[in-house]
Amino acid sequence: MNLHEYQAKELLAKYGIGIPKGVPAMSVEEAVAGAKSLPGPLYVVKAQIHAGGRGKGKFKELGEEAKGGVRLAKSIEDVQRDAADMLGNTLVTVQTGDAGKQVNRLYVTDGVDIAKEYYLSMLVDRASGRVAMVVSTEGGMDIETVAHDTPELIHSITIDPASGFQPHHGRAVAFALKLEGGLAKAAQKLSKQLYDAFTALDCDMLEINPLVETKDGELLVLDTKMSFDSNALYRHPDVAALRDETEEDPMEVEASKYDLAYIKLDGDIGCMVNGAGLAMATMDIIKLNGMFPANFLDVGGGANKEKVTAAFKIILADPAVKGILVNIFGGIMKCDIIAEGIVAAAKEVNLSVPLVVRLEGTNVEKGKEILANSGLAIVPADDLGDAARKIVAEVKQAA
């Protein structure tokens, strides 16, 4: 789960981490009122969407010459104009794709006198089984270019969760950022605070870009992104309550209600599989046979008839889907239960695209019998390769 910038900063502030004063706004009036509550005289108006690259983004409705989604305002009148430009319009960035995202929220912050920008992030390093703190002296909007062109400027410091954050980790961060004196001590303290927040909140990513040194000699978090381990959200109802479903794909939101692992893709063959590894293999073999998957959908090992029906409806809600491949290996999940769900869903949604089903495992013969006696145009498959060839042939024939 991801958060908006202002939400992430509010969480970090609870751990004593320095952030500029700011006010979220859902309307132009709220943005103006928020700016008036800040010291000024400079303000920053930020579009709040779940995507990076906002500063260099463009609004579809405002033309190529329009400023991006992060703007410096020198007066209350500028704040009002910028808020009116952004709210309700579509911001296109390198991370949103051409469709962009509609801006429904703003964050108005106090201006900061910046002396230097740095980069600092934390994530779970799967290879080492540790938390990695990634830092660079080259913070700002072009950190991706820095990582690509000058990777030697990116430093990674791993922290063993068994021993936790130690003073030497903080010193390593300060050294990598080339800080001395009071700023070095501030960086060590900030690193510990960030680690505490990261672990206590069960984050899987925390990015500060930029972390700024002010001309007054402070370190402030100027922008931040946070995402969380969805499996741990039950421990953090306060964080779960911050979820903004308008920033997510509607089908992914619907899938989450049934505990389905669903990700929309750009292809035209819908997939329903049990098990993440089998789902990846299914998508690969579809592509091997000349077409592309429309989604990743893992119904899990303990799916019931209702869950399978919901999965079917979600796949068919995508207008790009021209055919469906069901690939089930029945271990914990019985093939007859899957078959009943497939038949029920196909009848309920009035299936109008080709459907190929491959079943294997527990109660497979009973499952195949249910499909054969359903009266529906379901194409059975003997194995995964056979299933992929058949669904591709069926889709091409129906085109």
Image (cartoon, rainbow, N blue to C red):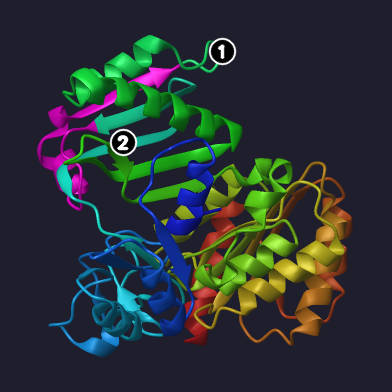
Residue found 76% across the figure and 78% down from its top? 346
Check disc 2 and report its element: helix, strand or loop: strand
Locate residue 11, reporting x and y percent: 53, 46
Q: Earlier in the sequence, mark 2 or mark 1?
A: 2
Q: Confirm whether the magenta stretch covers residue 156.
A: yes
* Within-10-Å neighbours for mark 1: few <14, some 14–19, many 20+: few
> Residue 302's x, y, as percent?
81, 48
Query: Is 393 placed above or below 94 here?
Result: below
Relative to 318, is 186 on the left or the right? left
Could you tell me how far apart the alpha carbons at marks 2 and 1 are, in whole angstroms? 22 Å
Residue at 34%, 86% in the rendered image: 84
Q: Give the camera-side residue of 120 and 21.
A: 21
Q: Amino acid at mark 2?
A: Leu
Q: Residue shown at 33%/51% (left/top)?
A: 223
Q: Which residue is mark 2?
A: 120
Direction from residue 241 to residue 112 in the image, left or right: left
Residue 293 placement (x, y as % from top left)? 48, 64
Give residue 170's mark. Answer: none
- The span shown in magenta is 136-159
Determine whether, in the image, residue 215 is placed left or right of residue 229. Answer: left
> Which of the two marks, 2 or 1, is nearer to us in this view?
2
> Where is mark 1, residue-wise?
162
* Residue 233 showing in the rendered view: yes
x then y, percent, for residue 319: 53, 83
SS label for mark 1 = loop
Q: How many marks?
A: 2
Give the answer, above or below, for where 208 lies relative to 71: above
- Give me the residue at 73% from left, 45% from top: 234
Q: Amino acid at mark 1?
A: Ala
Residue 82 falls in image quadrant? bottom left
